[in-house]
Amino acid sequence: MWPFRKRARNRYVARPEKKQEKARKNEPVTRLGKLLANANWPVWRINFVIGIFCVLWVGLWLRAWHLQMIEGPRLADRARKQHTAVELVSGKRGLIYDRNGQAIARSVEAKSVYARPAEVENIAETATKLSGLLDIPVQKILADLSGKKKFIWLKRKVDDATAEAIRKSGLAGIGLSREYERYYPFKHMAGQLLGFVGMDDKGLEGLELALENRLGAMPVRQIVQRDAMGRRFYLHEAGRAQPAGEDITLTLDMQVQFMAEEAVARAAQEFDARWSGALVVDVQSGDILAWAQYPFFNPNAYRGASSQLYRNRLAADALEPGSTFKPFVMAIALQEKKVTPNTLINCEGGKWETRNFVIRDTSVQGILPASKVMRYSSNIGMAKIGLALGASQMSKHLRDLGFGESAEIPVANSRGILRKPRDWGEVDIMSAAFGQSLSVTAVQMAQAYLTFLNHGIYKPLRLIREDTGVEEAPRRVLSEKAVNEVMDMMRDVVEQPDGTGKRARVEGVEIAGKTGTAQKADTRARVYGEKRLASFVGFFPAREPRYFILVLVDEPTKNPYGGVVAAPAFRSIAQKLLTYTGILNEVRVVARQEAPARRQRGLRLAKAPGEPWANAPQMAQIPESMQFPGHRARASDRVPDVTGKSVRNAVELFARAGIVPTLKGNGNRVVRQSPAPGAQWLAPEKSASYILWLSERQ
């Protein structure tokens, strides 16, 4: 409004000069003031807002550039760590098969319970629940969960029911990890040879330890995806790939293994022995068909076994062999022309006193030809042959036979004791000639006899069936003439009525062998004590050896003699082996032919190494006493119904039938199987046709 002048009656009138004066006072005195006074503020406000948005937009782009170009690699690495996890995959150990393709050692999936203490919500409540499920004291679980470790194992390789209970409990910070547990379907059969693996799936004894580099699967680190809860998942099947060990096929035949174990167990029990063992060898191929030892050891229950029980004595224990060593000394003496089979030797009436040594025989004998020295197993006669031979020649040939050296088999074995010739005195020469003052293992004896029966040409024992691709040049150790003469002497040991091995005879086939009764040294008193090692070695057919069997019975208390204790065990194994392989039928056919024809062609067998016997009876025709439990199940049953069963139970049922099923899927329960339950069993070589589909739940 315009200013007004004050009039009468309290009225105001406009005063233009006042207005002009006020305008002059409000005029800006500076350029900025004039600019602000004349500014168009609505436009300024709009421009200011636009400028703020431009600055923010440029700032965001600069920040994005910084994150992408400068901080990008570091942030990407952190993102990968949040959304992926690195797990150590142990993988499955390789399977161990016998020569017929039956799995005798395999790995089965198992679950282990672990805890991440930092993720456990209620330690006391969790410990109480886990104590009941895992059968572990509450205080121990509390101590584990209260520690500072980020990861702990609560219990390794639990059974399927426990694993399912843990899964259903849904306890925070508690989980299940997949591992593998070694399983031996035939239980104690060849237990000491196979050995066992520990909790971490590493071989600790036997072949499992010796072949760890081949059987074991090297753990690999594998990156897997995980969600916001930390749960792992796989985007494709390749993510499930796991390392696996190499499968190995042994030369063992589980049917022959059962025969041998049954015989040595009976011998040890009947004569109350400390332990007993046997080796069965195929002479033509050098394959070890059976490696039996009693008392039995079940690798499935190794935790409760003592080291003496799972000790592989046939390879690790070096003992004085006794009279079973005499054939080698006799063959060396014949080769070196120190004696002939007809050389007369005075056996001194059963007792021979030298300057510092007295040698006794178990029978009273006078002057005998060298051939009968073997038949009557005269220590005195062999001692005189040893003196004629001398330490140097004897030691050289014994080393060529493999004594004093580790055997070439993939299992830890002792070198035994065979001293250098310069360390031998007269007493050592005489005692070594009849199997004392030196020590050998059962494996060394088998190796030496394999060379002996191969007409004196060295042939290595085989425990693994594989083609190495390297053929060694034949190496003759003993002359064929000397070997044949000693084989005739060994045949007389069994076949002659006055032979010490007559209890090893088998009707229908000629057996050759040698008994042994070795005194065991008392290491404390440094003298020979009352304990004995009874043994018997034999082969058949006597003129064309096909199989060789060595039987040891350590410290029998009821009778110490090898001809009484070990020879019947040999006979039991030989009888069943003859029927199983079909040799007995072939020998009977040959026996009906004329003698000249027999000498001309010998006992030609229709079986090549690794091939089935042409005349062998079918498995179902073998007497029940000769069949191992798994074979009896196979012969009478059909394919069982394993749907709903745990993997362990299902695999065991199939393994008893000699079948190794293929497992598909992940889990601990069988949800489907092929062929259907009740179907006829297929041949073992068609194991791939048996498939079990697995799942976590039915």
Image (cartoon, helix red, strand yellow):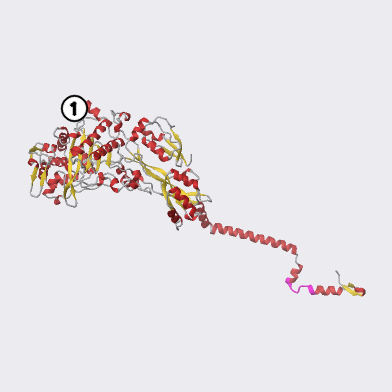
Disc 1 marks which amino acid?
Arg
Residue found at x 47% / y 44%: 164
Q: In which quarter of the image is the N terminus?
A: bottom right
Residue 474 vertical position relative to residue 140 in the rendered view, above or below = above
The quarter of the picture where residue 596 lies is top left
Q: What element carries label 1?
A: helix
Observer-nearest of 60 and 102: 102
Residue found at x 90% / y 72%: 13
Q: Is residue 212 in view?
A: no
Q: Position of residue 371 (x, y in %)?
A: 12, 36
Q: How many residues crowd mark 1 within 10 Å: few (<14), some (14–19), many (20+)?
A: some
Q: Where is residue 459 in the image (x, y as percent from the top left)?
A: 23, 40
The quarter of the picture where residue 367 lies is top left
Question: Is residue 355 rendered to the left or right of residue 21?
Answer: left
Question: Is residue 342 rendered to the left or right of residue 618?
Answer: left
Observer-nearest of 47 and 169: 169
The quarter of the picture where residue 340 lies is top left
Observer-nearest of 686 and 377: 377
Task: State which region is magenta.
Answer: 25-32
Q: Where is residue 122 in the image (x, y as percent from the top left)?
A: 50, 54
Q: Is residue 486 in view?
A: yes
Residue denoted by label 1: 598
As for residue 627 lying within the magenta part, the answer is: no
As for residue 26 lying within the magenta part, the answer is: yes
Q: Position of residue 315 (x, y in %)?
A: 25, 45
